Amino acid sequence: GGGAGGGGQAKPFVLTGACGQQAELNGMTFRPTEKSITGAPIYKADDEEIFVYYDPDCNGDVEPSLKPMWILDIKRPSRTSGADLDGDRSCNYLARVYSDDMRQPPMDATWWANCEKGFQEVSLSMVPLYHQVSGGTCEASEHKDILTTDDCSAAASFLGLTGRSNTKLEEVAWGPKGCYWNSSSSRGPYLASGTSEENSPAAGMVLLCKQAGNKAAAISAAVGSSWYTALLSCTLAYLLSQSWASHAAAAAL
């Protein structure tokens, strides 16, 4: 199965829905970092050598030719190959989904993934990295507060709020702290520090939030090098060794 990929510019996403054997992938943020020769974006996980990319034919000139697909893998894809982007002349991956849309992977789809008992269907979601919250807090919406100028500007751009006459980030002292957009005047974004007693102008203010990421990864970053990183590389190395998805088996699905 599979869903339609959206149109427009490639945007970062947070991966969710991975099976238990690939649970370390849940909550990872993937960003479009470059493009392959096909024009499709190549996404890379923050701080990890894990990629999502489009491959028109994952085994290259080896028969039978397979349908185009989005691939999740730990091997960096080539930017100059038009097919078999990992160069192994076979179809090895952590997960894949057939798709004719090379603009971006489907936001919600059934992927063929390497799990506890071999390959099986798994519903993966590519959740948008930023969100608008019209009432309440980011935490109440199960999102994270945006507390840096880079994230605040990126959120406004991601959500299509910038590109208008009054779109310049302003740092302000009112609160509550966070990143805001004034939908009434199309002004902002505003990064509020919450250091003043003054409340934010109520009319038209929309709170911008960030998708919650992987808590295990955050813990690991806090302690410097980590059991998490070691576990991830061991687990993914094992998965790759089990990633036998032969052309015949894949073609039959």
Image (cartoon, rainbow, N blue to C red):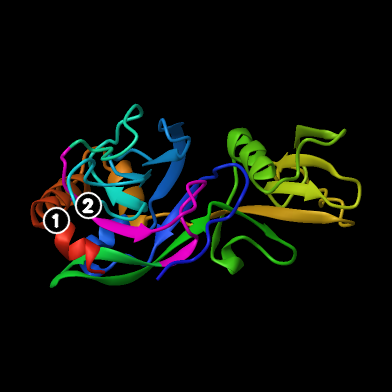
| Disc 2, SS | loop
Q: Mainly helix, strand or loop, the magenta region?
A: loop
Labelled disc at residue 93: 2
The residue to which callout 1 is attached is 243
Question: Of all residues shown, which one is farthest toward the front?
Answer: 63
Asked if residue 106 lies in the magenta stretch, the reply is: yes
Nearest the viewer among 169 and 104 is 104
Instruction: Give me the residue at 49% from left, 49% from top.
Output: 104
Q: Which residues are magenta?
A: 88-109
Q: Residue 12: give x, y in percent of width and height.
A: 51, 45
Q: Earlier in the sequence, mark 2 or mark 1?
A: 2
Q: Residues within 10 Å of mark 1 (few under 14, many from 20)?
A: many
Q: Are marks 2 and 1 in contact (CB under 8 Å)?
A: yes
Q: Residue 9: give x, y in percent of width and height.
A: 60, 42
Q: Residues within 10 Å of mark 2 (few under 14, many from 20)?
A: many
Nearest the viewer among 242 and 27 is 242
Nearest the viewer among 82 and 198 is 82
Question: Of all residues shown, which one is farthest toward the top?
Answer: 80
**Residue 50 sits in quarter:** top left
Instruction: Give me the residue at 44% from left, 33% from top.
Output: 33
Q: Residue 220: give x, y in percent of width and height.
A: 28, 47
Nearest the viewer among 252 and 92 is 252
**Residue 35 sits in quarter:** top left
